[in-house]
Image (cartoon, rainbow, N blue to C red):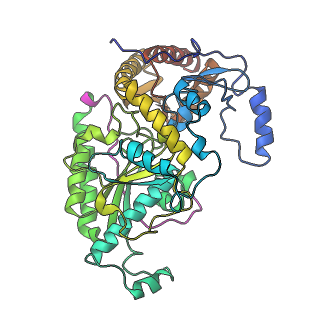
Amino acid sequence: MTVDLAPPFPGEPARSSVKTAVPGPKSEALRARHQRHQDARTVHVYQDARRSVGNYLVDVDGNELLDLYGHIACVPIGYNHPDLTAAWKDGRFDWLMGYRPALGVAPPPEWVDLVEGTLMAVAPSGHTKVLTVTTGAEAVENAIKAAFAWKARRRRGGASWTDEDARLAMLNAQPHTNDMQVISFEGGFHGRTLGALSATRSKAIHKIDFPAFDWPVVPFPANRFPLADHTAENQAAEARALQSIEDLLVRDGQRVAALIVEPIQGEGGDRHASPEFFRALRALLTKHEVAFIVDEVQTGAGATGTFWAHEHWGLPEPPDLVTWSKKFQLGGVHLREEFMPAEAYRIFNTFLGDPLRAAQFRIIHDVICRDRLVEHTQRVGAYLLEQLSELVTRFPATFSQPRGQGTFAAIDARDGATRDRLLHDLRQRGVEAGGSGDRSIRFRPALVMAARHVDEAMQLFADSARAVG
């Protein structure tokens, strides 16, 4: 297929280049220092931020790696984009140099411009309010809090709380609040703070030894691919999941404040469901007066070929709350009017986000719009999926299940041990990649990835498959 290339990225390497083992000796020396004070065991490499360009991460040993991982989906327009570097140099961020404001107390006027002109410019359809925080987990925490506040007010018939409610709240003994629940899906990941962690279901290591709310979990259908070969199986799995949710809501729906779901389960293994499933889910939650939280922390800002992944579903009624972070550079929740808490200070903290990162996102959003990067990602993603399918055809004993929307994509290895060997071998060949689930390799590149980067990646994946087997 023909794929339009992204605008040329000045100074980007022609291809990856490996000079040492990855991680190299300088990275390992830094890890030894780092480990004395923080847990550095998860570090892949130490990055030379000044030398990294476009789609290529340069580490402290001088290795130039084609970056398909993007700091776990956090890099929107590549490294050292000229529009961003120019903004740093021309004074666009001077209003933030002297202090970091407490945005809920004394925000600068530029913050209002950012909220109106950028954060609300990208708001999902039907959403008129936004809450800003710093991280994705905070976004989830506060979306859940907003859903609880909405549900509690509905249970009180629209009235505010009483003095007795306030007294019991201070004792952690609210009889009609402490029983409220949030439904999440098997395999879901929503963050590592305690509230979000109660909805996270991807890996035991995230949860073990930490107290959790007794909230219900339901099966995620996890479509099999290619979709055309698994139609009946996928439809049956989705029907079972919907029936499980409906049974729960019929039995105990008055206690359920919200259901939270990722459009594509990222940490859980890049698991998908159909638009029809999500439309049926929306109708079910509306019927039972349960808030619909869509967690777009990984998928938001264009990676799936639409700005919001849930746009693919064709919902007749929008989600109630949408969480976001990563490519936005800060965290937040867009929400429908009725989900904004009626009283001040219900959702509040000192910083209420990071205005510097929001200012950066304004430039990022301008670049996304000017260079039509969402549409570009849609085209490159289709090419990537085509090439992943070809890779499976060439190496059926090593790879399976090519899948994705836009460049938010994945492929399965034969098993977890093979996946881990492939990831190590790929780094030695110049590819920074990461896993998801128990056997998947995920693609989370910047929106400026072009067809030539796909071609380079597929060549290196093929070389790695031959070496690892």
Specify the segment rendered in magenta: 208-228
Name the residue at 66% across, 29% down: 49
Q: Quadrant of residue 298?
A: top left
Residue 44 in magenta stretch? no
Direction from residue 176 to residue 101 in the image, left or right: right
Name the residue at 40% across, 17% down: 387
Would you place residue 196 above or below residue 20 in this image?
Answer: below
Q: Quadrant of residue 307?
A: top left
Would you place residue 332 above or below residue 162 in this image?
Answer: above
For the residue pair 256 and 92, the one nearer the viewer reads as 92
Q: In this rendering, does residue 402 appear at all?
A: no
Direction from residue 64 to residue 456 in the image, left or right: left
For the residue pair 326 and 44, the one nearer the viewer reads as 326
Which residue is most to the bottom?
Answer: 164
Name the residue at 46% across, 80% down: 169
Task: Name the spot of residue 317 as percent of width and height, x first.
Answer: 21, 50
Q: In this rendering, does residue 267 appear at all?
A: yes
